[in-house]
C-alpha cells in the first residue's frame, strides 16, 4: 500500500495523543509503522494500521518506550556528569600535589597553583556535584 500524507499525519497525531512526547522516538515509530504498512498487500489503511499497532505492542508499549527513552537520556547525562566530575577532580588533585611540591621545594608559583586548584574545586567541581545531586533527586520524583 502506498501511504499518503494524510495517513502519515494521522499516525503522527495518534502517537502524540497516546503520549509519545519525544520527537526522535515518534519519528522512529512513524517510520516503522509506515514501513510495515507499505510492505503489506492490502489497501485498507485502518486494518493495516491496527495490525501494525498490534505488531509493535499497542499504545501501552509506546508509553513504555517513551519511559525507557527518558531513562536512557538520564543515564547518558549521569555518565557525562560523572566523567566531568572525575576530570575536574583529577585536575584539582594534580594542582594541589604540584603546589605542595613547589611549596616544599620553595619554587615560584606554588601559591598560584594552590589558588588555581581551589578555584577549580569551588567554581567547577562543587557546582557539578550539586547539579548531579539535583538531577538525581528530580528524576526520583518524576
Image (tube, rainbow, N blue to C red):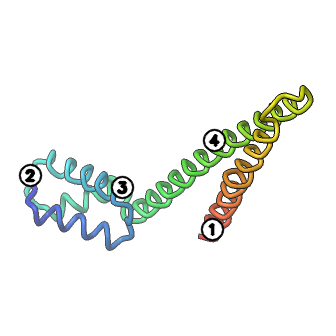
Q: Which residue is mark 1?
A: 138
Kindly report the distance in space between the C-alpha atoms of the residues bearing marks 2 and 3: 24 Å
Q: Which residue is mark 3?
A: 25
* Residue located 77% across and 35% down the image: 109
Task: Give the residue furthest to the bottom.
Answer: 17
Dot placed on the residue nearer the N-terminal end, 2 or 4:
2
Please identify, in this view, whether the residue under mark 4 or under mark 3 is nearer the observer: 4
In the depicted view, which residue is nearer to us: 35 or 94? 94
Kindly report the distance in space between the C-alpha atoms of the residues bearing marks 2 and 1: 46 Å
Contact, CB < 8 Å: mark 2 with mark 1? Answer: no
* Residue located 33% across and 60% down the image: 23
SS label for mark 1: helix
Q: Residues within 10 Å of mark 1 (few under 14, many from 20)?
A: few
Contact, CB < 8 Å: mark 2 with mark 4? Answer: no
Kindly report the distance in space between the C-alpha atoms of the residues bearing marks 1 and 4: 20 Å
Going by the image, does 132 lie left or right of 40? Answer: right
* Residue located 89% across and 29% down the image: 106
Amino acid at each position: 500500500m502506498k501511504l499518503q500524507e494524510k495517513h502519515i499525519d494521522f499516525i503522527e497525531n495518534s502517537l502524540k495523543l497516546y503520549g509519545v512526547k519525544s520527537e526522535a522516538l515518534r519519528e522512529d515509530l512513524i517510520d516503522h509503522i509506515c514501513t510495515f504498512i507499505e510492505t503489506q498487500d492490502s489497501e485498507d489503511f485502518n486494518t493495516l494500521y491496527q495490525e501494525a499497532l498490534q505488531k509493535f505492542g499497542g499504545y501501552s508499549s509506546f508509553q513504555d518506550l517513551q519511559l525507557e527513552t527518558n531513562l536512557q537520556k538520564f543515564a547518558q547525562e549521569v555518565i557525562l556528569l560523572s566523567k566531568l566530575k572525575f576530570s575536574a577532580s583529577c585536575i584539582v588533585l594534580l594542582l594541589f600535589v604540584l603546589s605542595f611540591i613547589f611549596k616544599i621545594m620553595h619554587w615560584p608559583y606554588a601559591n598560584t597553583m594552590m589558588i588555581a586548584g581551589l578555584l577549580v574545586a569551588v567554581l567547577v567541581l562543587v557546582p557539578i556535584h550539586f547539579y548531579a545531586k539535583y538531577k538525581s533527586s528530580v528524576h526520583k520524583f518524576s
